[in-house]
Structure formats: C-alpha cells, structure tokens
Image (cartoon, rainbow, N blue to C red):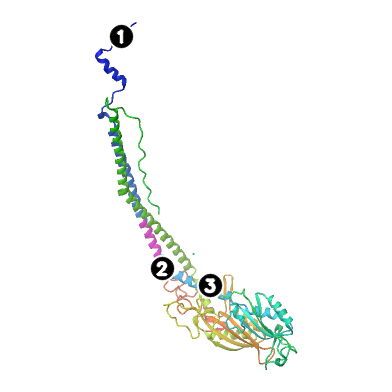
Amino acid sequence: MKAVNLIPSEQRGSAKTAAAGPAAPSPEGSPFGAYVILGVLAFVVAAAALYVLAGNSITERKAELARVEADAALVKQQAATLQAFADFKTLSEARVTTVRGIANSRFSWQRALDDVSRALPSDVYLSSLNGTTSGEGGGSGLRGAISAPAIELTGCTRNQASIARLMSHLRGVRGVTRVSLSKSEVPDAANTAPALGATPIGADGKVPLTATEPCPKGSPPDFEMVVFFERAAISAGAAPNAVAGPGGASGGTTGPTGPAGDPVSERTVLQNRLLVSVVAAALAGFLFFNFALKPKQKEASDLKAKVTEAQGELDAARALLASNQQARETYRSAYTSVVRLGKAVPGDDDVRSLVVQLDSAAKRTDVDFRSINVGGTSGAAAATPDAGAAVVPLPPGATVGPAGFPVMPFSFGFRGQFFRLGKFFQRLDRFVTATNERIGVTGRLMTVDGLKLEPDTTGFPNIKATVEATSYLVSPLEGPTGGATAAGPAGGAGAPGTPAGSTPPGTAATTAIVTGASR
C-alpha cells in the first residue's frame, strides 16, 4: 500500500521545524525575576535577624556589666570597713613569724659546750675558749674563713699525736663539720713558764694541774684550733568570627534555548543576570557585615571583656571580704599573741627587765652576774634604710636590725663553773621557745652572738666569761600592738564579742609581769 501524507503541503515546513526542537518560551514568561525577589527578601530577613540578635546581646551585656560593677563596689566597700582587721592580722602573723625565725635560728651554746667538753681527752688542757656565731671578732686567722658558728680552742697537750687524737674526737661532736688546726708548736724549754695567775680548764671542766703548772712538764706542744658548726642555722579575646559569604552559585539545568535561530544569545543573558545577582548579593553582604553587623559584634565583644574584668574584680573583692571577715573573727587571738610577744620584743629598750631576767637566770644556775654593757656592736648585721624613708628615732644604743625589728646589742660578764655556764645559756634560750605552732614567752628574746671563756683570777674551779648578745625591739612606728586595743584595731570597728574597754583573756598578766618584775 502506498503511504499518503495527510498534512497539508503549506504546513509541512513548520512541522519539520517543530521536529527539530521545542519552541523557546518568551522572556516575559521566565521565573528568574521571582527568584531574585525571593532572594532579596531572604537576605533582608536574615540580616535583620542577625542585627537584632547582636543588639539584644549588647543590651544584655550592658545590664550584666552594670550589675557586676554594682556588686563589686558594694563588696569592696564592705571589705574596706574590715581592712583594719586584715592589717592587724598581717602584723600579728609577721611578728610571730619573725620571732619564731629568730628563736629557731639561735645557736645552742649549751649543747655545743657540753659536747665539746665531753670530747676532750684527759691529757688536753685549755687555756681559753672563744665562741662566735660569725667570722667577725675571732682571734684566729682561720676563724674568718667561714661565716658559721665556731669555737676557738687554745691550750696544750702531751705530744703531737695527742693533738691529732683531739681533732678526731672533736670531729665526732654533733653538728661539727670541720676542725681546722691553726697552730701546733712545741715551745723552747726557756719559754715554758706559765703566765702569772693563769688557771687552765681541763676536760669535763676540771683543772688537774695547779695554776703555776698549766701543762705537763717538759716541752708539750701548744695548739690553736677552730671547730666549725657549719650546719647550724643562724637566722609568684577572640576576634569576631568572619561571616561566611553566600554559598556557591546553584547549578541548574540549562534553560530552554533562546529564540528560534539564536539560542546562545538567550543563554548568555541568563548567565549575566545570574552573575549580576551574585555580585550584588556579595556586595550587600559585605556592606552589611562591615558597616552594620561588625560594629555591633565588636561592641558586644568589648562588653564581654569588660564583664569578664568586672567579674574578676568582684571575685577578688569577695575573696578579700572573706579574708577580712575571717581576720575579724580571729582578732582576739591575734591581739593576745601580739601582747604576749610584747614581753619578748618590747616597745622600748626596757633595760630594767633585761637586767632582772639576766640576774634571775644567773642565780638559778649558780652563776655570778658581774657586769652588763648596753650598746656596742651587734652580731646581727644592721639593715640599710631605704632612700627617702622616714628616720625613726630609736632608743639609745639601738640600731636598725635585718629581721624587721630594731636590735640593741649588749655584753655582760659573769663568773662561774664550766657546766653551770651551759645551763645559764639554756635558760636564756628558754625565755622564748618555738615548738610547732606555739611560741612560749617567759622573757626577752635574745641571741648569743659570741662568748669568751678564760681562767678566773680567783682560781679553780671558776671561769671568767664575757658574752656578746643581742636583744630585739619593735619598731616605734608600729608600737607594741600597732595601735590596736582589746576592742579592735586602729581605725577598725570593735572585734566580735569584745565589749569596749574589755581585755581578751590571758593578756592582763602578760603585760604586767616580766619574769617576776613589775613594770
């Protein structure tokens, strides 16, 4: 059968064209404009939301900053009213620490003399004993080589081997780190005559020979040596986050072809429109971020830093307030401690009580108290006052000390037997004792800086002793209690539970009695 084309001949050309491809839609019917409008609206809504959120954050942080600053000001005001208690607590703790340090750093002369006497062999005879806590004032050239407590021994023995044995014995004494021999010399026979009136000190404090025969007959060696006690203690914002730009351009299927006969031109127009839209959106986002959102973010960031700083000040003020409140609660015990320490470290030289205490200690140890000289050179190094510091008048004979206390050097002499001398030094140390957290005070705080023992002219068994010591005072700027009273510190409110004019328990007796002497 023959095929017949039923399409009219005048329409057959347009049918071929339709078969070649679909007809392009008209530009007026494209949805691109609607997409642009929706994108602009979405951008505006998002920008407005970000801007409002940033503004709300600023408002909240301003309110928080004002609240924290108000709380900090209130807490600081409360802490300031209790600052006097904290200052007095600091004074009390500093004074207790200083007294404890001085008391614990004293060299035990009683133990040293006792141990050295027990270490002396029976054939050793001493003509003098000189003890010092530093290298100054020693009689031997070796003494100044080491700044540590040391005892210089001068005497004689039977032979050179006995000197070596003596050094070995002394090296085993508690605390001895070095025994240095300064001289060991056998004198000529013509020069062996003893000094007139010299009385030797033998082992264990005994004098086995007469005053006119200090050493064995013949030519025994004379020696000078130094025993060192070196181990003895003598006194610490994040930058705004970048706003990500819009995501990449959305890919899509190629739109319909352009008008019949020019599909490339229509595609180019659509691409240009899309490109212009993306650039416009990026520019709008850039302008919004830099001129609207970024200043808000910076302001919010600055406020956050201020809030953090104010919160830190508030926390510090709260900690200070808690510390001051605790100092106020413990004021009575701190005041009692300071008053008790006033017996050990008075506000003036108080030589009267010093003499009474020395005399009482001498009588209790059967030592003859012969003399006292106030002033001179102290074994504690004087501190150099700061430039421009106010000159504080001190009692006569006192100087500025290194431990925060003025010091008053003095020397005293007495006569007695060897072992009674050790008991006398032990009693001086017991005037102020520091055990664990407790400080016991029954008299003046003193340190023995040096001593010298020589045979007494009255003969055996008496020894003549000269002692260099240091007593301590409180600064006149502070006074015995730093201006505080039983009712409260200077410039502060009354202590809790303490009526005005009352005295904390245990303070009345300590201020009136000093080793049996009324002041």
Image height check: is 260 above or below 183? above
Image quadrant in which you'd find residue 193: bottom right
Front residue of 311 and 111: 111
Horizontal arrangement in the rendering, residue 477 relative to residue 469 (left or right): left
Which residue extends farthest bottom? 196
Kindly give the residue lying farthest to the right in the view shown: 217
The reply to whether residue 105 is visible in this rendering is: yes
Q: Determine which residue is flagged by label 2.
A: 81
How would you rate the neighbour count of disc 3 (Cα within 10 Å): few for under 14, some for 14-19, many for 20 or more?
Answer: few
Label disc, if present, on residue 97 of the rendered structure: 3
Residue drawn where x is 29% and y is 28% of the image: 263
In space, the residues marked 2 and 3 are separated at their CA atoms by: 26 Å
Q: Which mark is residue 474?
A: none
| Residue 84 in the figure: left or right of residue 105 | left
Compared to residue 215, the image places residue 95 above or below, namely: above
Secondary structure of the residue carrying numbered label 1: loop
Of helix, strand and loop, which one carries label 3? helix
The amino acid beneath tag 2 is Thr
Magenta residues, start to end: 65-77
Residue closest to the eye, 515 or 195: 195
* Chain-order first, disc 2 or disc 1: 1
Badge 2 element: helix
**Residue 216 in the image, given as x and y percentages of width and height:** 74, 88
Amino acid type shown at disc 3 = Thr
On the image, numbered disc 1 is attached to which residue?
4
